[in-house]
Amino acid sequence: MNTQIKKVNEKSAARFYSVQALFQMEHSGLSIDSVITEFEEHRIGAIYNNTEFGMCNTSLFKNILNLAVLEQTMIDKATDRALATNWPIDRIDPTLRAIFRAAGAEMLLGKTPPKVIIVEFIDVANAFLSDDKGLPLVNAVLDKMSKELQQSEL
């Protein structure tokens, strides 16, 4: 069976890797520097589900990670307010937490229009979620977060 490999642009790859790195940091307790080194040496350029995540925009990757760590409290509070009542961020799937933190960090960077960030992270969520039932949640939460975080751009 001949499977076609889809290539992803460098910014999209940086977003994908940032979600993986944030997830890994939460579960392993590794420092941001250790995770960045691991990704630069071993993960960037890998193929996942017939998609090649060749070279990524390492500047965007590092900026997302650094800001997600630095502003995690602000991003998590914005996520909590965007989630349904009684579903705080610590009750949701850790993959979704990583998606919301990475997207929130990029929103705070203020260099990319929020609508682009939302579409990009819906694509990232699609790569990680086993079905598309979580995609409307990702869309709704990121839309609400973008409105709040635009007010807080650094």
Image (cartoon, grey):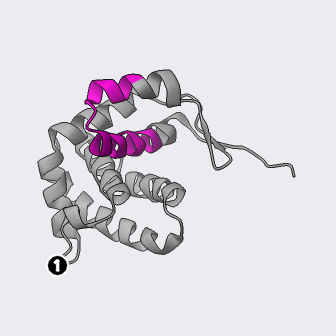
Image vertical order of residue 58 relative to residue 6, above or below:
above
Query: What residue is shown with label 1?
Result: 85
Across and down, in percent, residue 92 comes to: 28, 66
Does residue 115 show up magenta in the picture?
A: no
Residue 152 visible (yes or no):
no
Total marks shown come to 1
Q: State which quadrant residue 115 falls in.
A: bottom left
The image position of residue 128, as x and y in percent, is 49, 56
Q: Amino acid at mark 1?
A: Thr
Q: Which corner quadrant holds the C terminus? A: top left
Please give the name of the residue rendered at 38% of the width and 33% of the height, measured from the top-left corner: 61
Residue positioned 64% across, 50% down in the render: 49
Question: Which residues are the magenta region?
Answer: 15-37
Query: In screen coordinates, is 1 left or right of 76?
Result: right
Among all residues in the image, which is located at the extreme bottom? 85
- Tell me what residue is drawn at x 45 percent, y 68 percent: 135
